[in-house]
Image (spheres, grey):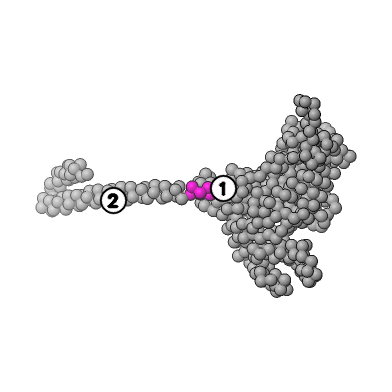
Amino acid sequence: MVPKVLGVLILASNGDRSEFSQDPYSYAPSFTESTPLGAAESFQLGSYLKSIYLDSSSPLHIRDMPLDPTHPIPPNKVNVHAKSGGESAAIFDSGIAMLQGMFPPTLHNKIELANGSAVISPLGGYQYVPVEMATVGDDRVLEPWTDCKAFKKHVSEVYASEEFMQAAKDAEHFFESVHDYMFGRPTSLVDMVRFRVYDYLNTQLIHNQTFAFRLPPTLIEQARGWVNYKETAVFSDKDLGGIGNLAGRAILSPITKSLERIAFDDDPLRVLLIETSYQPFISLFSMLNAHGDNGQLFGLPNYASALAFEVLRGPAPEFRDFVRLKFKNGTDDDEFQTLHIFGHPEQKVPVTEFIYRLEHHVVPQDKWASTCSTSWFPFGYAAIANEGAFTPFWLALVSMLAFGAFAFAVYRKYTQTKRTKRYEVMREDEVRVSMRSTINPGRSHDLFQAQDFFVNEKSRLLP
């Protein structure tokens, strides 16, 4: 029996774009833009998703979505987000192209006016699906590594690790072989990102026929292997809640929230589409321990890839909800392959288990500052340190500590002086008592009483 699909969450990568580079430590990106090939790839992905989840003849047609393929999609059933980082132009364009394939124009997308006339949306009934984007440089969900001190520290530690240094040594032969095809660009394992050794070779191989005719066989495959190793080392972590998994931990925030919304029958949401770059794919492959037909998934996804989280309703009497993951690696795959996650032999996991395993490692926006802080300050102070108010806060804290230290020093000096004076008085009286006892031992008892009176009277006069 085919389970009912309550909804689906789609994580899609951008299509083909122009050459692109990033800083190897901060991952600050350069500008890039989508190509007609990239738009076609994303449009093809959208059409495929439509055939799987929106066509009434499909066994995986999403419940409560229109059965008539020409019916306009209700906007409250679909949420779309796109990354707003440096490559946002290519990602946004890819997202629009995917939506065009998934929600094509329909003559039913029209409105009737009071005068009796009907107006069809432009371009033959084009469906304008709203796309949400965060402010550039402030996208803590789809680009959480930006300005993250803890992640930058993690990157430096990866590059300095013995494993990475050994890998760089093993890659020397490849970089010597590819040097003549990089035209003066630095070639090293770290430079796989700075000058995008793989990205440059791949872009030229796709768009430059002269270059494609000259590039020796297997070099592009070797480059792909080394960039997969390098990016997996940076954007994954042995610890599920490690900072290396930040890209996956942040994007899980809207994913887990949407899973709960879709599973709740009274919520209209049925489709969440997130158009983003490759980094969350790498982290999620690692966090979910995702295995496909050819073993564990890792590395960069191809252009216009998709990771689908299907929400399924189980059979009676429990009607339990499940999550099933599927992955389509760009145009290399004709269809989705179902994944095994968390080491499960089954191809689906209960929604409650999925959320339980991950909820403590999710990084929502309000926890980003404390997660990314390298400061010893607890809780809210870490957020202050990351929000630009750190300098005045630090000055105020230092001033308070300095005043406290000064007050303590004054108090200590005062008590020490008082103790010294008291000690000197007592020593003086002991000497007098000793001298008088030597002269007249029989009067020692009276002298001791006099001493007590003298000491008490003189001590009372001390400050």
Amino acid type, mark 1: Ala
Q: Secondary structure at mark 1?
A: helix
Mark 1 and 2 residues: CB-CB less than 8 Å, in contact?
no
* Residue 290 position within the rendered picture, expressed as x and y whole percent measured from the top left: 76, 52
What residue is rendered at 33% in x and 50% in y?
406
Check the picture and name the quadrant holding the C terminus.
top left
Visible in this render: residue 422?
Answer: yes
Tally the marks: 2
Neighbour tally class for label 2: few under 14, some 14-19, many 20 plus, Cα within 10 Å: few
Relative to residue 167, is residue 299 depicted above or below?
above
Visible in this render: residue 343?
Answer: no
What residue is rendered at 62% in x and 61% in y?
24
Q: Secondary structure at mark 2?
A: helix
Q: Which residue is mark 1?
A: 369
What residue is rendered at 19% in x and 49% in y?
425
Frontmost of labels 1 and 2 is 1
Q: Which residue is mark 2?
A: 413
Check the picture and name the quadrant holding the N terminus.
top right
* Residue 36 position within the rendered picture, expressed as x and y whole percent measured from the top left: 77, 54
Q: Is residue 282 left or right of residue 379?
A: right
Amino acid type, mark 2: Lys
Q: Is residue 293 left or right of residue 153?
A: right
Q: Nearer the viewer, residue 76 or 264?
A: 76
Q: Quadrant of residue 225?
A: bottom right
What residue is rendered at 80% in x and 70% in y?
213
Q: Is residue 414 magenta?
A: no
* Residue 101 position within the rendered picture, expressed as x and y whole percent measured from the top left: 80, 45
User: Which of the two discs, 1 and 2, labels the residue nearer the N terminus?
Assistant: 1
Tell me where the magenta segment starts and ends, as one range: 385-390
Between the residue at mark 1 and the residue at mark 2, the CA separation in whole angstroms equals: 43 Å
Neighbour tally class for label 1: few under 14, some 14-19, many 20 plus, Cα within 10 Å: many
Q: Nearer the viewer, residue 47 or 408?
A: 47
